[in-house]
């Protein structure tokens, strides 16, 4: 498949998913008669705002990792397209999971659903990366050590997200907080990551 079209389609889906996040801001169906009523209704939406911020940066990280990975890929085969489509399918579920988490942050089902979606994204990304490694799809400038380091990093991220997802069944608020901490952690630049060309930010 043409690499330019592959990346353009993926970028469009990531952008669409981020746009859908904003549509989750919907005022509850209550009678608003005064400015005070409106202010109270808006302030009550603070969990939605936190969930929106969390998911905005999650999708941003996914897009950044996707770009860093395929910048050094010279061949796109059918299996890569397949795993990428599954990754994108899970990505467009993030806005729904985000709205659910923002509306019912204290409920285990909401935090668990959010974690399942993120874990699915991480799993499909890992499977896509594994396929690229098997197909020897990376350019010569990416050595085996860099590939092995990226594989370990993304696999570690998958395990962490799966663990936090299971934690959501027992203590959803702590799970919600850990999702936020993980995003903050992965956004902090570290030298070891910068030295690996195919790892922008580990999940």
Image (cartoon, rainbow, N blue to C red):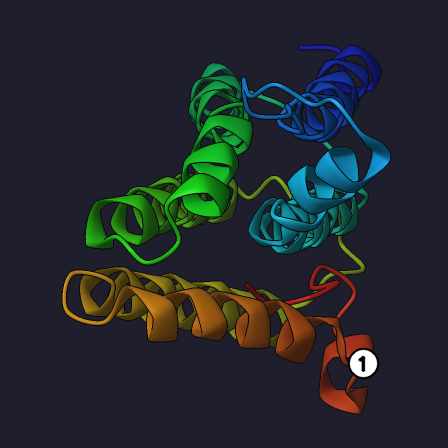
For label 1, the SS is loop
Q: Residue at x 73, y 19 (%)?
A: 16
Label 1 belongs to which residue? 189
Regarding residue 70, the answer to whether it shows in the image is: no
Classify 10 Å Cα crowding around label 1: few (below 14), some (14-19), many (20 and above). Answer: few
On-image quarter of the N terminus: top right
Quadrant in which the C terminus appears: bottom right
Residue at image position (77%, 17%) is 12
Q: Quadrant of residue 182?
A: bottom right
Residue at coordinates 77% horizontally, 49% vertically from top-left? 64
Q: Is residue 41 visible?
A: yes
Please say if 58 is above or below 78. Answer: below
Q: Is residue 130 above or below residue 41?
A: below
| 103 versus 194 height, above or below | above
Task: Please identify the quarter of the rendering in which residue 110 is found.
Answer: top left
Left or right of 202, for residue 79: left
Who's the residue at 32% across and 58% down the image?
A: 106
Residue 101 lies, in percent from the top left, at: 43, 45
Q: Nearer the viewer, residue 66 or 16?
A: 16
Q: Position of residue 170 (x, y in %)?
A: 14, 69
> Residue placed farthest to the front in the image?
33
Q: How many marks?
A: 1
Which quadrant of the structure image shows residue 114?
top left
User: In this orientation, which residue lies closer to the viewer: 147 or 127?
Assistant: 127
- The percent coordinates of residue 165 (x first, y second) are 27, 60
Most extreme residue toward the bottom is 191
């Amino acid at each position: 498949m043409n690499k330019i079209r592959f990346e353009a389609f993926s970028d469009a889906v990531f952008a669409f998913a981020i746009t859908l996040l904003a549509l989750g801001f919907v005022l509850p169906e209550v009678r608003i008669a005064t400015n005070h009523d409106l202010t109270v209704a808006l302030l009550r939406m603070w969990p939605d705002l936190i969930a929106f911020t969390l998911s905005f940066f999650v999708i941003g990280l996914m897009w950044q990792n996707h770009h860093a990975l395929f910048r050094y890929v010279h061949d796109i085969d059918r299996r890569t397209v397949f795993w990428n489509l599954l990754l994108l399918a899970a990505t467009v579920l993030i806005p729904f999971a985000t709205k659910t988490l923002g509306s019912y942050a204290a409920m285990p089902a909401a935090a668990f659903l959010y974690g399942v979606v993120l874990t699915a994204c991480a799993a499909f990304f890992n499977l896509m990366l594994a396929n690229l490694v098997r197909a020897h799809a990376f350019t010569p400038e990416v050595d085996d050590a860099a590939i092995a380091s990226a594989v370990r990093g993304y696999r570690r991220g998958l395990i962490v997200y799966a663990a936090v997802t299971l934690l959501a069944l027992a203590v959803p608020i702590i799970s919600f907080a850990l999702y936020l901490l993980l995003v903050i952690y992965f956004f902090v630049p570290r030298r070891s990551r910068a030295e690996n060309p195919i790892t922008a930010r580990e999940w």
